[in-house]
Structure formats: C-alpha cells, structure tokens
Image (spheres, grey):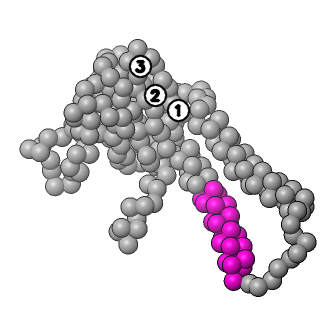
Amino acid sequence: MTLWMNFNLQDALSPSMEQLIFFHDHSMIILILITTSILYLMFSMLFNMFINRFLLNKQNIEIIWTIMPMFMLIFIAMPSIHLLYLMDEVSNPILTIKSIGHQWYWSYEYSDFKNIEFESYMNQKNNIKMNSFRLLDVDNNLILPLNTNMRMLITSTDVIHSWAMPSLGKKIDAIPGRLNQISLNIKRPGLMFGQCSEICGANHSFMPIVIESIPMNSFLKWINKFN
C-alpha cells in the first residue's frame, strides 16, 4: 500500500491543485476508454474468422476515425485551457510576498510590511528534532494566512532556480534579473513541503521550501512581532 501511495498526487491544499487533480482524473478516464477500445478491436480482429470483402476502401470508416479523435481532443483541451487561465490569473491580491533564490537557500520579503524579511536554510543534521523531516525542514518557515488571495513574486540572484510546491499545484522559475509571479490561496492549515526543481548547482537538493499556513488572526499576531 505504501508503494502504491508513492504514485499518487499529494493532497490538494489549494483550489488550483484541486482542479489539477480533477483534470488528471478526467484525462485518465478518456485515455482508459481509448486504450480499452483499441485493445478490444485488436483482439477481435486477430481471433475472429470473419472477412468483409467490401471493406477495402470505405470512406465512412475514414470519416469516423478522423472525427472521433477530434472530439476526444476537444474534451481534453477545453478543461485544460480553462485551468491554464485560472492558474495564470492573479486577481486582487491582499498580500504580496517576494521569494528570492540563492545558492543554495531561499529568502523571503513581505513587501506590504516594513522590515519583514528573512532567509530560509535547510536544517542541518545537528539541528534535526524527533518530529522533523530530514532534508525537508528549514530554520524559518514561510508563514502565510488561510483563505487569502496572495501574490508571490519570484526572482534569483545568481542562477536559475525553481520554486515548487506540489500540494498547492505551483511551480515557477526564479530567473536572475526577472520577476515572475503566481497567485496563492491556501484552503487548509498546516505545513507544506517543496523543493527547488531546477538543477542549480552542487547543493541543488538542499534548498527545501516549507510553508506554514495559519488563520488570519494568528498571522496578524506574527506580523506584529516585527514591529
């Protein structure tokens, strides 16, 4: 059972990730139907002895196997285009966070507040606690509020990194000299773990990302600690 769970997607913690899972299931159903139909036709042609001597040049069959794949592609393309639009749209963000990739750690800036910025390093072996995850926990989590439209700006100071958070369905490149942006909206409290998904150097696998989502009241109390 544990091996089978490794092939599944992470639990969705954002609306966009929920839609990504729905689209994945929708596409897999269509692919299973196509595969089953092709296998059935192949076996029926191989193991039956029926021969149609008029089935040498049939325009009807040509039309059918041209139009049917077109409709199948439409059923896949329409929800895909809709989902791409929703993931790319940033609508009325209440909070803006800037994430900067370094070799090999992340730093965060809360642009809407003064003097709130920190660096996030992976916990070393001598700082790992009993309830920590090796190679995934960091010394400073990125604190974000629940059920809030947020915007994240991503850039880099040296090489190309990639800020990825699978449970939120987000992955975007951090490119030196350029600002990329994504929208965030977290539905559930808890810890989320991600990593840099770009091969950025020797310690590429040692710059994890940890988001801690908390209610808005707790977030405001945490913000007030910096004032």
Residue for point 40% across, 65% down: 5
Q: Quadrant of the N terminus?
A: bottom left
**Residue located beneath label 3 in the image:** 111
Measuring from the top left, give residue 43's x and y in whole percent.
67, 78
- Between disc 3 and disc 1, the foreground one is 1
Q: Quadrant of the C terminus?
A: top left
Q: Tell me whether the residue at label 1 lies in contact with that at label 2, contact meaning CB atoms closer than 8 angstroms.
A: yes
Residue for point 34% across, 45% down: 193
| Residue 133 in sight here | yes
Which numbered disc, 2 or 3, marks the residue that appears first in the sequence?
Answer: 3
Label disc, if present, on residue 152 of the rendered structure: 2
Measuring from the top left, give residue 64's x and y in whole percent.
84, 59
Left or right: residue 227 versus residue 148 is left
Q: Secondary structure at mark 3?
A: loop
Task: Using a 10 Å C-alpha cutoff, classify the residue at mark 1 as few (fewer than 14 neighbours), some (14 to 19) or many (20 or more).
Answer: many
Does 26 lie within the magenta span?
A: yes
Q: Amino acid at mark 2?
A: Met
Q: Which residues are magenta?
A: 25-47
**Residue located beneath label 1 in the image:** 183
Q: Secondary structure at mark 1?
A: strand
Does 29 lie within the magenta span?
A: yes
Task: Using a 10 Å C-alpha cutoff, classify the residue at mark 2 as few (fewer than 14 neighbours), some (14 to 19) or many (20 or more).
Answer: many
Measuring from the top left, give residue 191's x and y in whole percent.
35, 47
Q: Tell me whether the residue at label 2 lies in contact with that at label 3, contact meaning CB atoms closer than 8 angstroms.
A: no
Measuring from the top left, give residue 72's x and y in whole percent.
74, 55
Q: Amino acid at mark 1?
A: Ser
Q: Main secondary structure of the magenta part?
A: helix
* Label 3, label 1: how far apart the Cα atoms are: 15 Å
